[in-house]
Image (tube, rainbow, N blue to C red):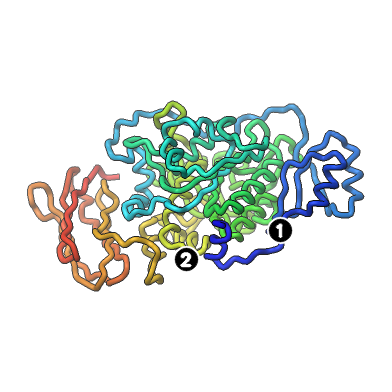
Amino acid sequence: EKALLRRSRQNIQIKENDLPVSAPYLDSLKQHGFTLINRSKWFNAVTARTNDSTLVNYLTNASFVAGFELVKKSTGKISLNKFANEELFEIDPNTWKDVYGRSFHQLQMVTGEALHNLGFKGQGMTIAVLDAGFLKVDQLEAFKELRNSGRLLGTRDFVDGGKFVYDYSTHGASVLSVMTANLQGKIIGTAPKANYWLLRTEEVAHETLIEEDNWVSGAEFADSVGADIINSSLGYTTFDDPAQNHTYQDMDGNSTRISIGADIAASKGILVVNSAGNSGNGSWRYIGAPADGDSVFAIGAVDSLEQKAGFSSFGPSSDGNIKPNVAGMGQQTILANQSGSISQGNGTSFSSPLIAGMMACLWQANLTKTNMEVIGVVQKTASQAQNPDDSIGYGIPDFSKAFIELMKDNTTPIYSKPNLPILYPNPTSGQFNVMVFPENEQNITVQVFNLAGQLMVKKEQCLIGGFFNNISISDLSSAVTGVYVVRILGFEKEFEERLLKIGVK
């Protein structure tokens, strides 16, 4: 039902590739000794296992088989952990006293706290997380509120089958925590009220093409259960068998099965968010699949100073599309760890969920927009929208600006208008904004005082009625660190709030 609703909102029709693979074809394969692993209606294909090499002749002659290829061959070889370079360092959580703890900076960098303050925390949105395993998510304190609130909608394992995913790898748990962890004073995720499906598609011990088939099956499942967003902190370039390796020329969005599948997912109305990759310092250098997908929102990484992280993979796609699309904080990202505290992690694996969570909050604010319209607004309002490059694409998103842009042409948006102005970022290093929604046109005055009562800033502005207005104040950049009082005169309700000025960024 939710899948049909998502499509209906975006005027997406049912197509032939929504129909299941023919049952007689599947029965014939099973009768000849194949074990079916994955079935893909999008590709009208299956992934099947056999130990009998003579069955190749059967496939060659079967009238319903258009073609086939080897996606995994048992070699006994164990791959190195592909996530080994995404180091995790446990840190002291007590250096920040704010409810967000040390995770506040990565949220503030993309002005995500503005949407949270407006009440948009992902409520009603569903995010499918495709990953390698979600160790102890069923036990860890960071996910207790997710479990107890009924927002963990379910799990599936597309590697080994079944529903158990709480083992195999810590990677998925780390990724999930960036979106939905709730450890007050340590970490709050970017979409802490969204619903989640946990889907295991990656096999850490091996790197083979079958994982792309697993991913497609996971994406099809996400479509069927009504996921609005997919976060995939996965990417594929080279494999255990060099004969299966992709090339940079394959990174055109139309060559690899996983990238084609990701674009199909987007065509069904799902907003597909994928890590750009961590090959920026390596011989590969470029993005991997499916980040190259034309309709995939590929996320690069920056550090805490908003500079490109060295490991973050470069674009463009081989056919010239701007990649990555945008970037978030992926170096020293705060995440929940297995010991019940917080760690810092490095990798686009962590910038991707950071952005995916915020995309859920933004889209929640106006569900009349399509997935691609939401992506377009975020790119249009990002830090280097006028000069995108192959390092961080359109730049670092500004979700407060994206929110205002998203609402411009919508006089009856589906959200609750705030009764009071919203200050963000708070704390600030000097520049801050006042977001306000007046019912009617009116003039207001923003005043900023220090605690001695001295007027530091005064700004007058005429507000447009019935719309979100954003007032930017940049006059505190040279002010000393401390607490200031922001007072707004002339608004419908009296408003005064304290603002914390911290050291220059």
Coordinates of residue 216 in the picture (x, y in percent): 66, 48
Vertical position of residue 371 compared to residue 122: above or below: below
Q: Is residue 416 left or right of residue 295?
A: left
State the residue position of label 2: 368
Q: Nearer the viewer, residue 409 or 9?
A: 9
Q: Residue at x 61, y 40 (%)?
A: 156
Give, as a three-letter code, the residue at label 2: Thr
Coordinates of residue 215 in the picture (x, y in percent): 64, 45
Q: How many marks?
A: 2
Place residue 377 in its image quadrant. Answer: bottom left
Q: Nearer the viewer, residue 487 or 381?
A: 487
Q: Residues within 10 Å of mark 1 (few under 14, many from 20)?
A: few
> Which SS class for mark 2?
loop
The residues bearing labels 1 and 2 have C-alpha atoms spaced at a distance of 27 Å
> Which SS class for mark 1?
loop
State the residue position of label 1: 19
Q: Residue at x 57, y 57 (%)?
A: 1
